[in-house]
Amino acid sequence: MLEEILRRIREVQHFPDGPIPLHAPVFAGNEKKYVIDAIESTFVSSVGEYVTRFEEMLCSLTGARHAVACCNGTSALEMSLRLAGVRSGDVVLTQPLSFVATANAIVHAGAEPVFLDIERNTLGLSPSAVRDFLQAQCVRGQGVCRLADTGQRVAACVPMHSFGLPVRMDELLAICGEWNVPVVEDAAEALGSSYKGRYCGTMGQLGVLSFNGNKTVTTGGGGAILTNNDELATTAKHLTTTGKIPHPWEYRHDTVAWNFRLPNLNAALGCAQLEQIENFIETKRKRAAAYAEIFNGTGWEFVMEPEYCRSNYWLCAVLTNSVVEKKTFIEKANASGLGTRPAWEPLHTLPIYQNCRCGELSTTIDIASRLVNLPSGVVRNF
């Protein structure tokens, strides 16, 4: 069975021979033209017309009122947490099935992550797990949510849309709203994914995107903050631009800030990529449907988008039946040139985070033990 699955996966890629990476960028549009234009303008750093154009294109695509382009997704998430009010000594609720940057950004903001379980059908933060934790271990008073035993403030909640699959945001927003906990969406993997018609990254107080080299749209390295709050957007742009007071030639700064803005050179690449995003997502969705057909009847489960959602299928995933099957599949696939990988090691198991507070994590442990990511780059000739 496994050999037949590998053969059909390669067939779906329209690539009969040679290595097929897990996810590689496709530059089939105006990328070279725009990058050369940015170089010739001499505005290659964080000042330039492509940065503004890129932010405007993100707003047009997602419906967000504001987009603030940053040098990477981690910096965008750290800044968003700070804008949401996260301070030293606070705790932030999140999920352990995520790339390490989610937890790192929380720590960079001075807080501690609290890891709560994911849902089986979304692979993202479980609203029920959040509700149960808040009811069992937290107290409310004077508009603030705190841990009952330590008194630490629960300053934010960070759901992550795993592999582009949207979290159940309505339930999560309602629960966090009852406990006065701001929601910051980690939509690093979910550009173009939507939940009940709303784009991922636009439903929380702030949302974060990533444009790393392996994302659906890449700027080489980059990220963005999305928000509908005018004041937060203004503050975000100011703090990510070293706190410089705008002036044609004077350098005056009114706060200790960060140099987190996206360079114009990277934004030029991103503008060309965004021009192609609907085609990118369409081909990824067609390939996901083909994968679902391959695994139908095999006893393994291809992970489909949740109800009421449209996923970008950034990384397609299949659930095997055991750790042994997962390991065998990954080893044989990579030996044959097919780039596959397991899910990330759950963050609560890493030495740097193993002492963090956790909820009951049975779903996380089960999913991580069986999940395999499949080759998921854009297929040009689908």
Image: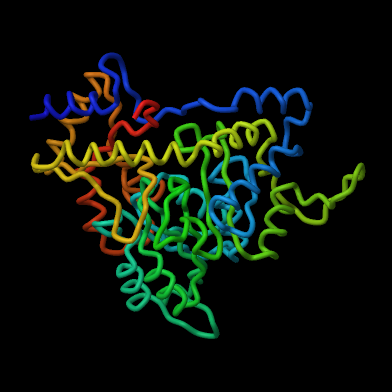
**Above or below 320: residue 237:** below
Q: Quadrant of the C terminus?
A: top left
Q: Quadrant of the N terminus?
A: top left
- Residue closer to the observer: 25 or 146: 25
- Residue at 34 percent across and 56 percent down: it is 124
Residue 126 in picture, x, y percent from top left:
32, 63
Residue 131 in picture, x, y percent from top left:
34, 73
- Residue at 40 percent across and 77 percent down: it is 138
Which residue extends farthest top?
17
Residue 231 in picture, x, y percent from top left:
70, 65
- Residue at 29 percent across and 60 percent down: it is 307
Looking at the image, residue 233 sits to the left or right of residue 313; the answer is right
**Above or below 76: residue 314:** above
**Above or below 45: residue 152:** below
Which residue extends farthest right?
249
- Residue at 52 percent across and 50 percent down: it is 105
State the image quarter where residue 288 is shown: top left
Looking at the image, residue 14 sits to the left or right of residue 302; the answer is right
The tally of labels here is: 0
Looking at the image, residue 77 sits to the left or right of residue 323; the answer is right
Q: Is residue 337 at all visible to an observer of this figure?
A: yes
Q: Is residue 149 at all visible to an observer of this figure?
A: no
